[in-house]
Image: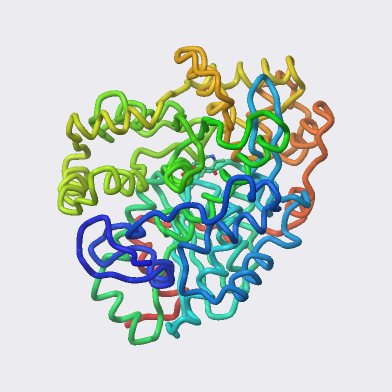
């Protein structure tokens, strides 16, 4: 299976190479030369647990991996790290199905991919690449800790995480600032997520720098969702979610389901698109946004325009103006025309916007249903669903829930909707308590707030939080954007 850049350079690599490099040399994202069909029948998947589903869905993308080693990699990626044995669960509430993807070490869905990414990289290195891998990652809040949890104290890897100073939740901050892995470094950057992401991309694109690193046998790589090794593990949970709906009798094997995804960088929903292309019966891909509704406008008008202020919301992991993974969709839907993608991305870089053809617009509108919700609506809905059903959803998930309701009402489509439930409500306890009308004036810190939430809702306080409360702060410094390269050099001991 070949992997090619979305920007059209004809340099090919295999899955292992794409995982290690993270981003192609022309700045494009790697995409497999064809999306394989699911290798077994839908019925067969209903007999599998999560581990088997991951292995079966992902194997066709990595034919170069030894199958036994890959099996072990999947097992060791997820075993003993999640707070429920089945890893992922599906819950029904308010007429929809919630695919709870947040039972991993950092209480958000990014654990699903970041638990296995280090394993994929390790297997890929065995395919012949001998370098020390330095992972550079920009995070809007959840990726950072999840990536460090995956790479922590692994031989042959270092990891540096940049996040926008003051723009992540208190919980997210504590998770990253208390990281104790010896090979891990966390740096707050003055600016917003896009600044941090741009800074990282700049370091990757700096050829002089990569030559200097190469001399020291250091290879830079990314744990951001631009890495194909992030995307592919996510395809598996849509297949798994579908199987659960078949098993509980909601649908018959072969029936359509829709999916609703709270979207930021467009990785999660793109994984659902991959699942659909592999043959999973998915109808609409419901793309849910918050006040930062760039994607909504894009799907409505065909014009992607990031020229607007980034708003800080109660769903910070969706506070993004440039959804990097959209590039992969454009490439795939535009008959793999890398030149065209390059033109759009250049326009995005230069003037902050681009416009797709009307033909292309029709294609995306056929596939996707866009929606966005404002802050008050989100808070109201969290409360309303809780009062009606007792189900507690975090602010990101609530937006996908609203989107699902909106789609169902406006389209009349009665197929069940699987909602990607991306974070534990405890990760956003402040917002949750406020939405639920709980009085936090007597709470001394986020942990008190979380306990209040636990007491009121009857949900158990996650063990992940209990541990965090006692952990000492290790990283507390904020840097200017211009210092990012220096931070990287220092941590990796590369001065010239
Ligand atoms: C990262 C994240 C998202 C957005 O996912 P993308 O793959 O970037 O679209 C949504 N919700 C939560 C809780 C997240 O951490």
* Front residue (pair 350, 78): 78
The total number of labels drawn is: 0
In the rendered structure, the answer to whether residue 275 lies left or right of residue 10 reads right
Residue 127 in the image: above or below residue 22? below
Q: Does residue 171 appear in the picture of this structure?
A: no
For the residue pair 112 and 248, the one nearer the viewer reads as 248
Q: Is residue 492 left or right of residue 400?
A: left
Residue in the picture at 72% in, 59% down: 81
- Percent across and percent down for residue 266 are 42, 42
Q: Quick one: quadrant of the N terminus?
A: bottom left
Q: For the point 48% across and 62% down, which residue is it?
A: 60
Residue 482 percent location from the top left of the image: 32, 59
363 versus 234 height, above or below: above
Image quadrant occupied by the C terminus: bottom left
Asked if one can make out residue 26 in the rendered structure from this viewpoint, the answer is yes
State the residue at coordinates (60%, 76%): 69
Residue 470, image quadrant: bottom right
Horizontal side, residue 13 vs residue 478: left or right: left
Does 358 appear above or below 380?
Answer: below
Here the colouring is rainbow
| Location of residue 382 in the rendering, given as x and y in whole percent from the top left corner | 64, 22
Q: Position of residue 361 (x, y in %)?
A: 25, 30
User: Taking 206 as reference, is 251 above or below it?
Assistant: above
Tell me what residue is drawn at x 71 percent, y 53 percent: 49
Location of residue 150 (image quadrant): bottom right
User: Is 320 left or right of 475, judged from the image as shown?
Assistant: left
């Amino acid at each position: 299976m070949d992997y090619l850049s979305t920007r059209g350079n004809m340099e090919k690599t295999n899955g292992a190479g794409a995982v290690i490099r993270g981003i192609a040399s022309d700045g494009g994202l790697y995409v497999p030369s064809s999306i394989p069909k699911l290798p077994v029948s839908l019925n067969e998947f209903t007999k599998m647990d999560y581990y088997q589903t991951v292995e079966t869905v992902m194997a066709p993308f990595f034919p170069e991996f030894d199958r036994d080693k890959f099996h072990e990699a999947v097992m060791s990626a997820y075993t003993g790290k999640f707070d429920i044995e089945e890893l992922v669960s599906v819950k029904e509430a308010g007429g929809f199905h919630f695919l709870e993807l947040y039972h991993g070490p950092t209480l958000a869905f990014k654990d699903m991919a970041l638990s296995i990414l280090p394993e994929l990289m390790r297997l890929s290195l065995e395919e012949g690449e001998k370098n020390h891998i330095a992972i550079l990652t920009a995070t809007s809040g959840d990726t950072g800790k999840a990536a460090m949890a995956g790479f922590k104290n692994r031989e042959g890897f270092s990891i540096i995480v940049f996040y926008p100073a003051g723009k992540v939740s208190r919980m997210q901050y504590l998770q990253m600032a208390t990281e104790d892995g010896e090979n891990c470094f966390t740096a707050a950057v003055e600016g917003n997520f896009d600044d941090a992401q741009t800074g990282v991309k700049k370091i990757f694109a700096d050829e002089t720098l990569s030559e200097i690193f190469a001399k020291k046998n250091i290879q830079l790589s990314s744990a951001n969702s631009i890495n194909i090794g992030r995307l592919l593990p996510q395809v598996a949970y849509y297949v798994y979610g579908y199987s659960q709906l078949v098993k509980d009798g909601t649908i018959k094997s072969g029936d359509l389901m829709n999916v609703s995804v709270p979207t930021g960088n467009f990785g999660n929903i793109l994984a659902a698109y991959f699942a659909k292309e592999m043959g999973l019966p998915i109808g609409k891909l419901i793309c849910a946004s918050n006040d930062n509704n760039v994607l909504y406008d894009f799907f409505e008008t065909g014009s992607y325009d990031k020229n607007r202020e980034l708003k800080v919301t109660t769903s910070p992991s969706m506070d993004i103006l440039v959804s990097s993974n959209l590039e992969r969709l454009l490439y795939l839907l535009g008959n793999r025309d890398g030149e065209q993608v390059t033109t759009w991305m250049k326009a995005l870089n230069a003037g902050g916007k681009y416009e797709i053809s009307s033909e292309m617009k029709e294609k995306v509108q056929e596939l996707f249903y866009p929606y966005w919700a404002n802050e008050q609506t989100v808070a109201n809905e969290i409360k309303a669903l809780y009062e009606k059903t007792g189900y507690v959803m975090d602010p990101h998930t609530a937006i996908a829930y609203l989107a699902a309701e909106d789609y169902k009402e406006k389209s009349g489509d009665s197929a069940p909707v699987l909602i990607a439930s991306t974070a534990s409500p405890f990760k956003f306890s402040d917002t949750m308590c406020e939405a639920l009308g709980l009085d936090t004036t007597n709470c001394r810190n986020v942990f008190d707030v979380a306990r209040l939430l636990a007491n009121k809702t009857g949900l158990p306080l996650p063990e992940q939080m209990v541990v965090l409360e006692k952990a000492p702060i290790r990283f507390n410094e904020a840097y200017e954007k211009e210092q990012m390269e220096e931070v990287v050099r220092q941590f990796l001991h590369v001065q010239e």
